[in-house]
Image: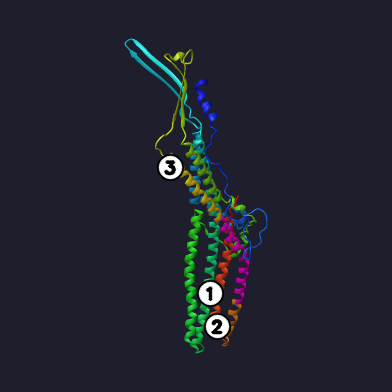
């Protein structure tokens, strides 16, 4: 038995050679710090990013996100791919150890008056590769890194789903506000039109004034119809993300409540946070897997040594199967090496090219992350000033319209002045809603692009 295991023991002792290149994390191809300047607000030192449960403080939105995490089919498919990669890693890892098999058999024969019986019981393994040059070990390392890459991909999908659900929820709130504004404007314009028609009947206003008043009514009516459609489509999008119908009780109350219910996300000062973003980690694991594939391809150019071995007992009588001289053993080592032809050189070149491709993708993932965070910080640095200016514009437009409407009713100004100010006020209110949505959406964007969810 000891002799039978000597070749295996020697092989395991020699199995320390690794043909894979040493992995060194590439230097990030971006500046060491996040950008600063007129467009950017000052960032404080400290941990960047937020868990989504801290980011989202609105209770209804939290409920909708919880449902999305439980029911979204894209996320379910991604999690299934993680389990598939994990199973494939287990299969590959099993190749590093011999698969033991147990066999038992018996045969019975009779020739003339003589009976010939035989019994056997064996324990052994077949064609186990002695991994002298690390081929199997590097294939296992590649499978592990592929599995870890899918795990990071699942984390990235989870973060994206949370962000998309929150953004869809905020978009619905904004479109509901636009619909309410269009209906309010339509009602106000209709009152103005009714007054203008009365003045025209009395000879105090011309037909031109009536037709100009009609344009505002019809424009608002068109916006009402468009916004009704948009709100319905927003609900459909939210239902798809949540994986189930979102009832009316969970719909957003107002855009203002979401501004208070979505926290600001700290970004920190260093760009090193980008290296922990799940899509960047996914790209790095893919690069490590490609690096291990080079080792496996190099090892394939060296002799492949395998061993088939068995120990057991054999006897012509079942009663003496485990006694006396019934013990048997066998060992059958073999080695193979392609001399001419074969695809080993091509496989090695392919593995190196794949490694270069994944290196470029890893560096691009870092650059993309830097750009996305920088864009989000640029928006964050100016959105408060834009929102304040937009609110002042709404107040000024409202006052201008009120005064021009009073002067028109008093016969001091023309209807065109009141109509122009009414349209300006309508546009300013629409822009204010869009600015509020941009503020909330950018907070959600920074949560996603920093990618530090726990």
Q: Eyeballing the image, is 320 above or below 425?
A: above
- Identify the coloring: rainbow
| Residue depicted at 54% across the width and 47% down the height | 284
Chain part drawn in magenta:
368-396
Residue located farthest toward the front when viewing the structure as drawn: 340
Q: Earlier in the sequence, mark 3 or mark 2?
A: 3
Residue located farthest toward the bottom when viewing the structure as drawn: 203
* Gap between marks 3 and 1 measured at Cα: 71 Å
| Circle 1 crowding by C-alpha within 10 Å: few under 14, some 14–19, many from 20 | many
Residue corresponding to mark 1: 185
Residue corresponding to mark 3: 346
| Residue depicted at 66% across the width and 61% down the height | 42
| Residue depicted at 47% across the width and 13% down the height | 325
Q: Earlier in the sequence, mark 2 or mark 1?
A: 1
Q: Earlier in the sequence, mark 3 or mark 1?
A: 1
Residue closer to the observer: 122 or 403:
122
Q: Nearer the viewer, mark 3 or mark 2?
A: 3
Tell whether position 345 is magenta: no
Find residue 433 and report its image quarter: bottom right
Residue 417 tag number: 2
Tell whether position 374 is magenta: yes
């Amino acid at each position: 038995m000891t002799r039978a295991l000597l070749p295996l023991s020697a092989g395991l002792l020699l199995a320390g050679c690794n043909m894979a290149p040493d992995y060194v994390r590439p230097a990030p191809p971006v500046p060491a710090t996040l950008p600063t300047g007129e467009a950017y607000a000052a960032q404080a030192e400290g941990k960047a990013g937020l868990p989504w449960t801290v980011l989202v403080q609105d209770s209804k939105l939290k409920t909708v996100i919880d449902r999305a995490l439980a029911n979204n089919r894209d996320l379910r498919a991604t999690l299934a791919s993680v389990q598939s990669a994990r199973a494939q890693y287990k299969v590959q890892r099993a190749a590093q150890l011999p698969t033991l098999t147990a066999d038992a058999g018996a045969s019975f024969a009779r020739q003339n008056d003589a009976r010939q019986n035989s019994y056997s019981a064996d324990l052994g393994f077949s064609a186990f590769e002695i991994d002298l040059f690390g081929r199997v070990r590097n294939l296992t390392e590649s499978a592990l890194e592929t599995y870890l890459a899918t795990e990071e991909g699942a984390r990235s999908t989870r973060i994206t789903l949370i962000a998309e659900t929150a953004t869809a929820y905020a978009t619905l709130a904004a479109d509901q506000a636009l619909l309410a504004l269009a209906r309010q404007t339509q009602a106000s314009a209709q009152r103005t039109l009714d007054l203008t028609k009365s003045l025209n009947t009395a000879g105090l206003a011309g037909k031109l004034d009536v037709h100009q008043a009609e344009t505002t009514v019809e424009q608002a009516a068109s916006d009402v119809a468009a916004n009704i459609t948009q709100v319905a489509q927003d609900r459909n999008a939210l239902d798809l993300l949540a994986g189930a119908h979102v009832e009316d009780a969970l719909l957003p109350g107002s855009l203002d409540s979401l501004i208070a219910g979505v926290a600001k996300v700290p970004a920190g000062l260093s760009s090193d946070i980008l290296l922990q973003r799940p899509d960047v980690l996914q790209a790095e694991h893919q690069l490590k897997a490609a690096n291990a594939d080079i080792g496996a391809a190099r090892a394939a150019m060296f002799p492949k040594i395998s061993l088939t071995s068995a120990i057991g007992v054999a006897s012509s009588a079942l009663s003496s199967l485990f006694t006396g001289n019934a013990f048997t053993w066998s060992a059958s080592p073999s080695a193979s090496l392609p001399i001419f032809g074969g695809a080993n050189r091509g496989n090695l070149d392919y593995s190196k090219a794949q490694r270069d491709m994944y290196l470029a993708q890893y560096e691009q993932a870092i650059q993309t992350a830097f750009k996305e965070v920088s864009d989000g910080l640029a928006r964050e640095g100016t959105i408060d000033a834009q929102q304040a200016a937009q609110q002042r514009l709404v107040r000024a437009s409202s006052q201008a319209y009120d005064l021009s409407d009073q002067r028109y009713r008093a016969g001091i100004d023309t209807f065109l002045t009141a109509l122009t100010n009414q349209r300006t006020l309508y546009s300013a209110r629409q822009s204010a809603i869009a600015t509020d949505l941009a503020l909330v959406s950018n907070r959600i964007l920074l949560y996603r692009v920093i990618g530090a969810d726990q």
